[in-house]
Amino acid sequence: MMFGRLTLAAALLAAVPAFADGLPGAPAPFDKGGVKLALVGYISGGDFFEAFQSGAVRQAKALGVDLRIFPGKQDAALEREQIEQAINLNVKGIVIDHGLPESLKDVAQKALDAGIKVVAFDVNLDNPKIPQVEQSDHLLARLALEQAIKDNGSTFKAAYVYVAGFAPLDRRDETWTEFKTKYPGIQEVARFGAVNATTAATVADQAKAVLRAHPEITVVFAPYDEFARGVKLALNELGLTNKVKVYSADVSTADIREITEKGSPWVATVATNPAVVGAVSIRAAVLAVAGQDPGHNIVVEPTLLTQDGLRKAGVATVEELSAKVPAFGHSPAATAAWLSN
Ligand code: SR1
């Protein structure tokens, strides 16, 4: 595991009271409580998105923000509609979490035109007025693929799980493409993927068909934990867990259990703490609403987590990981003195 810097803020956050009547020393409108923000998502469900939302809720509460949650249910039209609803609720800021850019750009502009601040997490709205939060996806993919090369050498046959159109997956895909050029011995023999209400189960079915058709595959690059879970299910069912290794993105307590269990083929993941990313997204919106610039590209750095490292460290939960790997438990992104009251 890699280790980074710790600030006191994360450790203190748990002890921070909710400022329902306003934050002491904060600029308007946060000097009074109950400022309304909205969090509008595209993907509902799955460990990453649940933890992202809980981090956002916790941060909002700590800042006295009245956060309205709109779950998108993997439905682009519904996500648009929910942004319209948030505009009609007179929220001061909206965090848009994932989605399909073409269905969101105009409605996001409508919110800006209404004087509402907008922050986007992992959806490229291509608008200089909209700060973009991301997890440094190129670095994330690079760390996972370097680990794959360390474990397997630079000549192997791989399957790749990918769905185009999601900003983080597209960025990770750019790195995968670069790696295949840099290491011509890496051969992608199959590509598949799905993002839906049952991603892991769908990917498991796809992976079973692919692995049966291509017994030469020894590595699967599955850069989303729901993808990795699906591939792992397929490997278990086909009895291939000792032949194929899985490299992924994201982590949750359930993922740690799956990675560290005896005989698991899931040997590495590269991840941020999604709750920290949720908190950063809320802080970015709060800064913007207060008229302070959170920056345009707000990056939360990921950490490489290997099966070996997790086992040796005896880490079983995301909370333990946050305690042992300071960079995982806190991000210095989108902070200001008045936010850490
Ligand atoms: C379908 S996009 C899934 C990814 O979004 C977040 O960036 C998570 O890291 C997840 O891998």
Image (cartoon, rainbow, N blue to C red):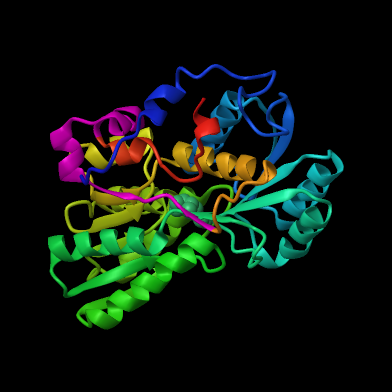
Q: Which residues are magenta?
A: 297-324
Can residue 15 be seen by looking at this rendering? yes
Q: Residue 323: image x %, image y %?
A: 29, 29
Q: What percent of the width, then of the height, locates residue 226?
A: 44, 49
140 sits left or right of 78 in the view = left
Position of the N terminus, as image quadrant, is: top left
Residue drawn 41% across and 70% down? 173
Indicate the position of residue 179 as horizontal and vertical percent values: 28, 75
Q: Is residue 245 in the magenta section?
A: no
As displayed, is residue 44 above or below residue 218? above
Residue 217: name its quadrant: bottom left
Q: Residue at x 54, y 55 (%)?
A: 295
The answer to which image quadrant residue 40 occupies is top right
Which residue is pictured at 53% across the width and 63% down the height?
A: 167
- Report x, y in % for residue 238: 29, 53
Q: Residue at x 24, y 80 (%)?
A: 182
* 312 in magenta: yes
Residue 188 visible in the current orientation: no
